[in-house]
Structure formats: C-alpha cells, structure tokens
Image: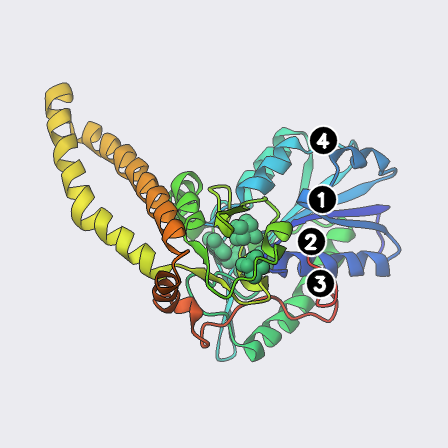
Amino acid sequence: MIETTYENLLIIYYSGTGNSKRVSEWIVQEAQHNGLKTHISSYHEFNPDKIADFKGKTLIGFFSATHGFNMPHSMLKFLFRFKMLKGSDIFIGNTRAGMKLSKLFLPGLSGIAMYIPALIMLIKGYIIKAMYPVDLPSNWISLHPGIRRKVVDSMVEHYEKLTKRFATKVLSGKRVFFKSFVLLPLDILVAPIAIGYYFVGRFILAKTFIANYNCTNCGLCMEQCPTQSIILEHNRPYWKFTCESCMKCMNFCPERAIETAHSMVFLLLFILIAMINPYLSAKVTDMVALLFNSSKIAFESFYFVVQWSVALLVFYTGYKLLHYLMRFPWINKIITYTTLTTWKFWRRYKIPTKMSEHTKIV
Ligand SMILES: Cc1cc2nc3c(=O)[nH]c(=O)nc-3n(C[C@H](O)[C@H](O)[C@H](O)COP(=O)(O)O)c2cc1C
Ligand code: SF4
Ligand code: SF4
C-alpha cells in the first residue's frame, strides 16, 4: 500500500480502439488496490455536473489517444468545458503509436498532445502533477495493417508494468514529467504538422471511409461512434466531416465492411497535385503580382490557404460522388478491391483484453 493524500481518482479517457481505455483501467486498478474511490468514464459519457459529487481530495486524470501529434478535437473541447474542482490535482496522459523491433520497444511521438491540454488546465487554475505517454500499438490502420497479435501482446504486457509503476508514483502525490519531455525537440519540430492536421488533415481523413458491399446496415458503427459522425444516406453509411478517424468503427465492424478508400485517395491526390495545384499556383502568382507587387510572403500565405481550401472541396465532392456511385454493385466491387484494407493481410486492430474484451468499449 502506498501513502496517499488523495481520496478519489477520476479518470476520463478518449479511446477509439481501447488503448487509452486500457491504460486508464490499469491506473484505476492500482488506485483501488490502494483504497481510493474510483470513477472512470469516456469523455462523451461524462456528465460535467458530476464533478460536484467528488468530496475530498481528488486526483483527476485525462488519458487520450494521440491524433496528428495532438489531442483529438472533441477531447480538447471537453477539456475547455471541464469545470474546476477545488483542491484537486490533474495528470495528463496519452497513448501513442509504439512499435517493437526485435526486443526493442520504440516510442510514438506526442507532439503537442499533452502540452496544449496542460496549458488549458493550468489556465483554469489546476495543478498539473504529471504528464505521461504510453506507447501501445498503433491503431492507425488506414496507414498500415494492424500489428501482429504476438507483438501486440508483448507490448501490452510491457506497458502494463510501466503504467502501474507510473500510477503508484502519481497516486502517492509525486510529480512525473521525465518521459513526456524526453522527445521535446522532436515534439517542437512536428508542431506545425499538428496544426495542419488540426485545421485541414483530419477533415480530409474523415472523407476516406466507405462501407463496402458486405455492409448489412446493422447500424452498429452509427450507434457506437463517439462523435456521431456516421449517418445513413441513401441507405448506406456516410462519414461526415466531424469524424476524427479514431478507428473505432473500422476496427469493430462485425462484417469487416469498413474500408479506407485508398484508390479514391490516390486518384484525388493525383488530380490535386498534377492538375489543380499548378493552375492555382499560376492564378495566385498573377493575383499577388497585381495586388502585392509579387511579395513572396503574400504568395506563400495566399497559396497555402487557397490550396488547402480547394483540397477540402475536392475531397468533399469526390467523396459525395463516390458515395453515390457505390450503390452500383460493380463500382462498389472495383472500389473495394482497389483498397489495401480489404485484403486479409491488412489486419484490424483492437487491444486484446482480459478485462475489456467482454465489455462493450464505450
Ligand atoms: C488518425 C490517427 C492519428 C494518429 N496520430 C498519431 C501521432 O501523431 N503520434 C503517435 O504517436 N500516434 C498516433 N496515432 C496512433 C494512436 O494515437 C495510438 O495507436 C493510440 O494508442 C490509439 O489509442 P486508442 O486505442 O485509445 O484510440 C494516430 C492514430 C490515428 C488513428
Ligand atoms: S457496422 Fe459495418 S455492417 Fe454495420 S452498418 Fe456499419 S459498416 Fe455496415
Ligand atoms: S466515424 Fe468511425 S473513425 Fe470516425 S469518429 Fe466515428 S467511430 Fe471514429
């Protein structure tokens, strides 16, 4: 048993495929083992008014997946709304895309995924006791096949031990920051990418999911999406811009019907890069010459805004068209067989569990 001044532990998590939920459960287990009252909830199920129920000194932890070197938008929004509980402390954690090479456990990269939330909570008046990343297997299966089960198991076992060690420290009131600052130079380097992802990238990715001909319209993906981003349009699941690519739907669809439309992505990127961007560049050059005396900074800024706005428009229109065309079985088959995610070797991912496999991930 550890000596602690805390009476309660509250953990709120954002988790698509279960990694962050699992880490939160490990910390809760450790707290229960040490006699604390515990409460654990997904951010979208947590009632902010509930915070008033916590009597006594409370440690509050936020654990989230990392998306584009940042905390996902809806979790950030949640933190903005989070009410102050006087006398409580905070810790912030993220799970990120770890890998394992032979016997070596390699870290993912947090970017600004913990600094921004820490700043928000500091401004609200909270004391930050810890920032801690956990490098569980990457769940980004739009980019790569899910990691092999044997490797996943060994990573989970490894990080369970480390997380429980972290939990003992933070629960006993110690400050834990070292691991979050080890990659600081790289975190700073990728900060512009994090901003680009936040303002443009995530919206483009939202328009890459499709349901193939195996979809039975069971409605499970719509029901379970934490951001309510899947709707039925013309009797087929349709992904809205609010999708945060948490990968929950794609990994949990019982028919394995959800794909990343790789061929559509390549085609749209080709149209943008080879056909639309050179035209835009020429137009912006003419406009800047006329209005700003060919200033380089004016060109770069205008071109950046125009290029990405057009990219969003192209993906929106391309996706709408594809969604319409997928009602024709032969087009559906072409799209399905030209995405890598349809093939057997492209494994899906969800954290294998003793604890959560039998419970619905919320
Ligand atoms: C769209 C997307 C973006 C991601 N970006 C990052 C990233 O910037 N850095 C990183 O280390 N991992 C990144 N990952 C990997 C996840 O953060 C990681 O696998 C996490 O553990 C998933 O947690 P969850 O199962 O709780 O959702 C990304 C995953 C997705 C799907
Ligand atoms: S969960 Fe899969 S099968 Fe069910 S509606 Fe969604 S895509 Fe279709
Ligand atoms: S649509 Fe799928 S990937 Fe997007 S937020 Fe919802 S569950 Fe996550």
The kind of residue on which mark 3 rests is Arg
Q: Secondary structure at mark 4?
A: loop
Q: Is residue 175 in view from this perspective?
A: yes
Instruction: Give how far apart the Cα atoms at labels 2 and 1 are.
Output: 8 Å
Disc nearest the viewer among 3 and 4: 4
The kind of residue on which mark 2 rests is Val
Closer-to-camera residue (332/252):
332
In percent of width and height, residue 169 lies at 73, 56
The residue labelled by disc 1 is 45
Q: Quadrant of the N terminus?
A: bottom right
The residue labelled by disc 3 is 165
Pointers 1 and 4 in contact (C-beta within 8 Å): no
Q: Is mark 2 within 8 Å of ligand 3?
A: no
The residue labelled by disc 2 is 362
In percent of width and height, residue 95 lies at 58, 57
Extreme residue in the top direction: 291
The residue labelled by disc 4 is 83
In percent of width and height, residue 75 lies at 60, 42
Extreme residue in the front direction: 328
Instruction: Give how far apart the Cα atoms at labels 2 and 3 are.
Output: 26 Å
